[in-house]
Image (cartoon, helix red, strand yellow):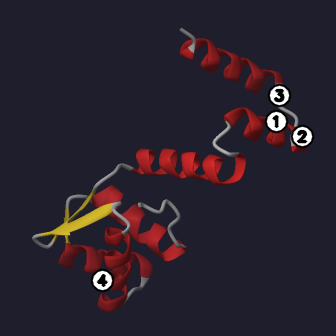
Amino acid sequence: MVTYNMTEAETFLAELIWESEPIGSGDLVKLAAQRLGWKKSTTYTVLRKICENGIFQNKGAVVTSKMSREEYINRKGEQYLEENYNGSLPNFVAAFMKRKKLSKKQIEELVVLIDEYKD
């Protein structure tokens, strides 16, 4: 099962990969050293973890994503809904609205979204 919760370090490396892919693993090490101040061993350790999660792959010393940033974020959101609201978007929205009032514009945007998905 793919886990859609990356650590902060994993997220930093993921962002570098998404903005630079395809990228050779050696070039990724150099980029991580420049941008994050990481050593080669740190980069490869974190890379191994995010590849094990099925989000990225390192084949032939070339690192690419198996899912886009947008797909990752969407799946992470779906996982959050499933784990915390039994997969129910209405339950999430109701809980959100108990703590924060929606603006008229936000309500109109939600109505448009709902209307677009009606049969």
Residue depth check, mark 4 versus mark 2: number of the one nearer the observer: 2
Cα distance between the residues tagged 4 and 2: 44 Å
Which quadrant of the figure contains the N terminus? Answer: bottom left
For the residue pair 79 and 14, the one nearer the viewer reads as 79
Q: Residue at x 50, y 67 (%)?
A: 6
Tag 2 near tag 1, CB within 8 Å: yes
Cα distance between the residues tagged 1 and 3: 15 Å
For residue 5, above or below residue 85: below
Q: Judging from the image, what secondary structure is the residue with disc 2 in? A: helix
Q: Residue at x 33, y 62 (%)?
A: 54
Count residues near mark 1 (Cα–Cα under 10 Å), then give few for <14, some for 14-19, many for 20+: few
Q: Position of residue 78 (x, y in %)?
A: 56, 45
Q: Residue tagged by mark 2?
A: 98
Residue depth check, mark 4 versus mark 3: number of the one nearer the observer: 4
Residue depth check, mark 1 versus mark 3: number of the one nearer the observer: 1
Count residues near mark 3 (Cα–Cα under 10 Å), then give few for <14, some for 14-19, many for 20+: few
Q: Residue tagged by mark 3?
A: 103
The label on residue 33 is none
Q: Residue tagged by mark 1?
A: 94
Count residues near mark 2 (Cα–Cα under 10 Å), then give few for <14, some for 14-19, many for 20+: few
Q: Judging from the image, what secondary structure is the residue with disc 3 in? A: loop
| Amino acid of disc 3 | Ser
> In this rendering, would 22 be left or right of 68?
left
For the residue pair 53 and 31, the one nearer the viewer reads as 53
